């Protein structure tokens, strides 16, 4: 990722933050519309889950040009999700997204997929 691309991500995310609650509500609404069975995985307060989502995305956006800074945090997050039986969520999204030529799943494709109307 170029420094310019990283800056676009950071500026865009900063513009979303003031409406973070609405963003999270729309995100999870779309996620559950895509696969209603996933709603069972979110037993806790969905508003709190939305705060967790925006917090993690804030960390990711702040370090988008420096992935080595967030790799461990993202791996730990993934392990916690799998331990709670939420690995199906990530697996389902990966299956829908496919991989690029390097075998890497595209986060931007995932966001576009989830936010499509």
Image: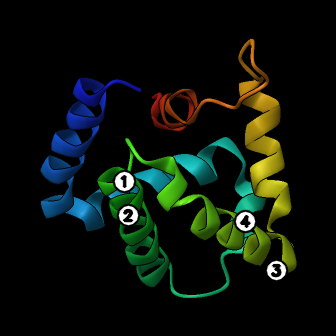
User: Left or right: where does residue 90 sit relative to residue 14?
Assistant: right
Between marks 4 and 3 in the image, the one whose residue lies nearer the viewer: 4
User: How many numbered marks are there?
Assistant: 4
Residue marked by disc 4: 78
Tell me the quadrant of the picture where the C terminus can be found: top left
Mark 4 / mark 1, whichever is N-terminal: 1
Q: CA distance from mark 1 to mark 3?
A: 27 Å
Left or right: 11, with 72 as reference point: left
Label 1 near label 4: C-beta < 8 Å?
A: no
Question: Residue 110, percent across and down?
Answer: 58, 34
- The residue that disc 1 covers is 63
Q: Which residue lies at the image location 62% right of the left edge and 54% below the top edge?
A: 32
Instruction: Sort mark 2 into few (<14), some (14-19) or many (20+) by Cα contacts within 10 Å.
Output: few
Q: What whole-number distance in Å separates the C-alpha atoms at marks 2 and 4? A: 15 Å
Q: CB under 8 Å between callouts 3 and 2?
A: no
Which quadrant of the figure has residue 74?
A: bottom right
Query: Which tag is nearer the camera, tag 3 or tag 2?
Result: 2
Q: Which residue is mark 3?
A: 84
Disc with the residue nearer the chain's start (1 vs 3)? 1
- Residue 16, image x, y percentages: 20, 51
């Amino acid at each position: 990722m170029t420094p310019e691309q990283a800056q676009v991500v950071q500026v865009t995310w900063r513009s979303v933050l003031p409406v973070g609650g609405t963003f999270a509500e729309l995100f999870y609404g779309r996620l559950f519309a895509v696969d209603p069975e996933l709603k069972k995985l979110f037993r806790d307060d969905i508003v709190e889950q939305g705060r967790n989502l925006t917090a993690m995305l804030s960390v990711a956006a702040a370090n988008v040009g420096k992935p080595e800074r967030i790799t461990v945090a993202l791996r730990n997050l993934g392990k916690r999700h799998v331990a709670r039986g939420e690995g199906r969520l990530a697996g389902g999204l990966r299956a829908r997204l496919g991989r690029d030529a390097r075998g890497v799943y595209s986060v931007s494709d995932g966001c576009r997929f989830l936010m499509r109307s």
